[in-house]
Amino acid sequence: MNDFTSPQTFPVKHIAESTVRRLSLYLRFLEEFEAKGHETISSGELAAFGGTTSAQVRKDLSFFGSFGKRGLGYSVKDLTAAIREILGLEHPWSVIIVGAGKIGAALAQYRGFSSRGFTVVGVYDKEPARVGLKLDGLVVRPESELERDIHRLKPQIAVITVPAEAAQALVDRVTAAGIKAVLNFAPAPLTVPDGVTLRAVNMATELEILAFTLTNGTTV
Amino acid sequence: MNDFTSPQTFPVKHIAESTVRRLSLYLRFLEEFEAKGHETISSGELAAFGGTTSAQVRKDLSFFGSFGKRGLGYSVKDLTAAIREILGLEHPWSVIIVGAGKIGAALAQYRGFSSRGFTVVGVYDKEPARVGLKLDGLVVRPESELERDIHRLKPQIAVITVPAEAAQALVDRVTAAGIKAVLNFAPAPLTVPDGVTLRAVNMATELEILAFTLTNGTTV
DNA sequence: CCTTGTGAATCGTTTCACAGCC
DNA sequence: GGCTGTGAAACGATTCACAAGG
């Protein structure tokens, strides 16, 4: 299914979010597997880890090419490289964090980002009391510097960790300044201009889904 | 479709997670709408807020009963109450947080939980340096007290915010002690016994989905 | 013989469209 | 006339099952 000349161009139309989420999971497992010195892996082993089926694993990969050998499985090394490339992790991404409250500060210092190629290049807050605080080598900067810094450092991704009321105005500012993707932790639904990607993580919603499941038996 | 005698029993078989997630979103909007003094709302207004369609809103609600009046819309007050009941938010839930690192501490102090009926009744860490720290009125307790406290306070939900390596062992302990739902923030896939619900939030995966979208154009 | 890659079948979710009711 | 509630149609994702290839 893949174009035989250039393994790095993926002729993709539309990929389901669930597929991308699983690829991210497979990648994590492949890295562990590689660290343990294993050379090959089958779709079944990958599936066991991801809580899915071998057919699902093969289908997920088939959207992007054929990476395995029949009868043998996949080269751990090659598949790791292929998935990193599919996900766009071959080059690092620059991230700014807008809001240096508890969650913003926690994310700024979170090791899991840098270890996967996401570099936090700036943390911003409007509170003078927080500006200047050191978070793991980064100094919190005033929100007034946002536009200047975005033009200078060209980060692609903004993580929004301000209170709900302030979120939309800040998203408007960072997207106007050139940010192309937004990860929203504020409990408010945001809108972004065309061409900008938006994802939201809502802690309260996650707990509410648990509450629903607890009260309605084994549903969901 | 609803049983006419008791509005609080919902004869539900299987509800999609996406439906529950949207209900949580509708509830947030309804509360805002109520605060603004509006008395009724249509499925179209609710849809505009949730980024969905009026048919979707009506279908979501139809799984649980009929709450509106044809030609008129929904009573904001009644629909708010109905969704709170559907989600199981009529009574408060007790939550423990396992791991008092950056993210655990941030969640322990997060207002968005308590304001929606989730009460954090304990925060635990194994590091002696963190035990005794005060987080917004809660004192970090030693992990060794987990079982005793779960038996005593009967929390239903555990939020796991320890490093990946430690996560499975702690989930085993809290589920053995009686926890029925787990929200996992550790970047490790966990397994839970039958009858226990598990959800995972992975910050790195969220960024990776953004990276995929950025590198693959308007896909996902 | 084992495991991949993939059309075809199945299953689940969303959208359509309209009858029913305020 | 306007909006809900809901079967039916359309769409999308997952699972099946098997041909192809090491």
Image (tube, coloured by chain):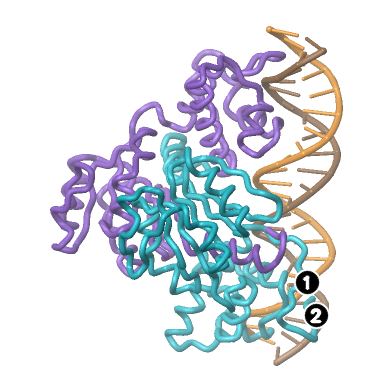
Chain colours: A cyan, B purple, C orange, D brown
* Figure check: A6 above or below B1: below
Q: Where is residue A126 in the image (x, y as percent from the top left)?
A: 40, 49
Q: Distance between the residues labelled 2 and 1?
A: 8 Å
Q: Can residue A51 be seen in this view?
A: no
**Residue at image coords 40%, 47%:** B195
What crowding class fits label 1: few (fewer than 14 Cα within 10 Å), some (14-19), or many (20 or more)? few
B38 sits left or right of B114 in the view = right
**Residue at image coords 33%, 68%:** A136
The numbered mark at residue A84 is none
Tell me the subunit letter for badge 2: A
Q: What element carries label 1?
A: loop
Q: Quarter of the image holding residue B98?
A: bottom left
Q: Is mark 2 on a helix, strand or loop?
A: loop
Q: Where is residue A197 in the image (x, y as percent from the top left)?
A: 63, 55
Q: Which amino acid does label 1 sit on?
A: Pro
**Residue at image coords 74%, 74%:** A10
Q: Which amino acid does label 2 sit on?
A: Asp
Q: Position of residue A28 (x, y in %)?
A: 49, 72
Specify which label sits upstream in the sequence, 2 or 1. 2
The numbered mark at residue A11 is 1
